[in-house]
Image (spheres, rainbow, N blue to C red):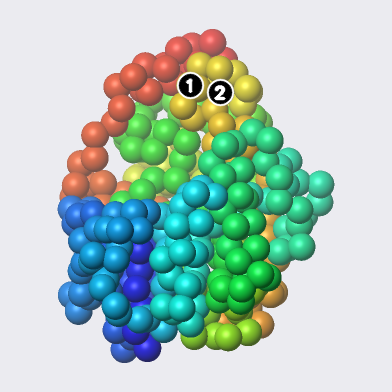
Amino acid sequence: MRILLVGGTGIISAAVARAALARGIEVTLLNRGSSEVRPAPDGARVLHGDGRDQQAVEQAVGGERFDAVVDFVAFTASDAEGAVATWSGRTDQYVLISSASAYRTPPTWLPITEATTLANPFWEYSRNKIAAEEVVFGAFRRDGFPVTVVRPSHTYDEASSPTLGGWTDLARLLRGAPVVVHGDGTTQWTLTHARDVAEVLVGLLGEQRAVGEAFHITGDEAPTWDSIYRTLAAAAGTTARIVHVPSDTIARRLPDLGPGLLGDRAHSMVFDNARVRSLAPFPARPTTFAAGAREIVAWAQSHAPAPDPELDAAFDELVARFS
């Protein structure tokens, strides 16, 4: 099998590249440049070009055809329209990476299945993903465009801390400062390690029963947010001092984080993976967050990612108000 990953240096795409190569699949990456955090793995061919620019793709790829194209950089309806124009007739399967945040938020019942309505009034990112899905499924219905939509939920790897404040939260834990957790900390949140998502996603490639269909790929572990912070603290050899702050208060103080918080993290999200399990095997031993947290701490200790001083100061203000 020959596959093209449009992207290839992100959290999920880098893991997919490694998983595909491990299975003997010929992997080509198309992106604008290399990543120091997630460089192209040995054995992958790298082409340079903007995956959302049809002319740049044509120049980079030429007349090549691929068994599957996995697109990690289509975020809007316009991006999807360009992808349909670019890849029609050039692949047996086009995989659009969407997002589980596209599901109805807040959810009306759990667990979420692929039949759950798509609607997110809080987050433009999610609405754009919904619009992109509508474009590719319209092309499938109209012209037989061979699309498969994959909706990952919150996916992390060793180089990405999944808490609201990311590396700033870890720095606060390490120095013993209180951390801000939205709401009352009891919201259940599904976390999935990128290599587990990658194993399942690669299993869908070449599967013709997946064409014209949508699947979410998530883990089955859904700890509370309090538990997530405490697990990360335990991996760092410390204890989490948690201060609960209302989500809308955090969103007002930190408007850049507000849409993703109110439109995703603030609501319990638990998923039923039965549909994708019927076509692709899940890892026999999925990565628990306890194990993933140890990887995150180890990576941080070796790479020393810098906390955000403005975010750190904002957390100090919220702690002072609500502790």
Q: Secondary structure at mark 1?
A: loop
Residue indicated by mark 2 = 251
Figure quadrant of residue 250: top right
Left or right of residue 289: residue 187:
right
Q: Position of residue 217 (x, y in %)?
A: 57, 66
Neighbours of disc 1 within 10 Å: few (<14), some (14-19), many (20+): some
Figure quadrant of residue 24: bottom left
Distance between mark 2 and mark 1 Cα atoms: 5 Å
Mark count: 2
- Residue 153 seen anywhere in this rendered image of the structure: no
Q: Position of residue 10 (x, y in %)?
A: 34, 56
Residue occupying image coordinates x 49% and y 30%: 257
Neighbours of disc 2 within 10 Å: few (<14), some (14-19), many (20+): some
Q: The N terminus appears in which quarter of the rendering?
A: bottom left
Labels 2 and 1 touching (C-beta < 8 A): yes
Residue indicated by mark 1 = 254
In the image, residue 43 above or below residue 233 = below
Q: Amino acid at mark 1?
A: Leu
Front-lying residue, 175 or 107: 107
Q: The C terminus appears in which quarter of the rendering?
A: top right
Residue occupying image coordinates x 55% and y 85%: 207
Q: Amino acid at mark 2?
A: Ala
Q: Position of residue 303 (x, y in %)?
A: 19, 47
- Residue 263 seen anywhere in this rendered image of the structure: yes
Residue occupying image coordinates x 20% and y 41%: 304
Left or right of residue 170: residue 112:
right
In the image, residue 132 above or below residue 304 = below
Residue occupying image coordinates x 68% and y 70%: 141
Left or right of residue 301: residue 78:
right
Q: Which mark is residue 315?
A: none
Q: Position of residue 74 (x, y in %)?
A: 45, 54
Q: Secondary structure at mark 2?
A: helix
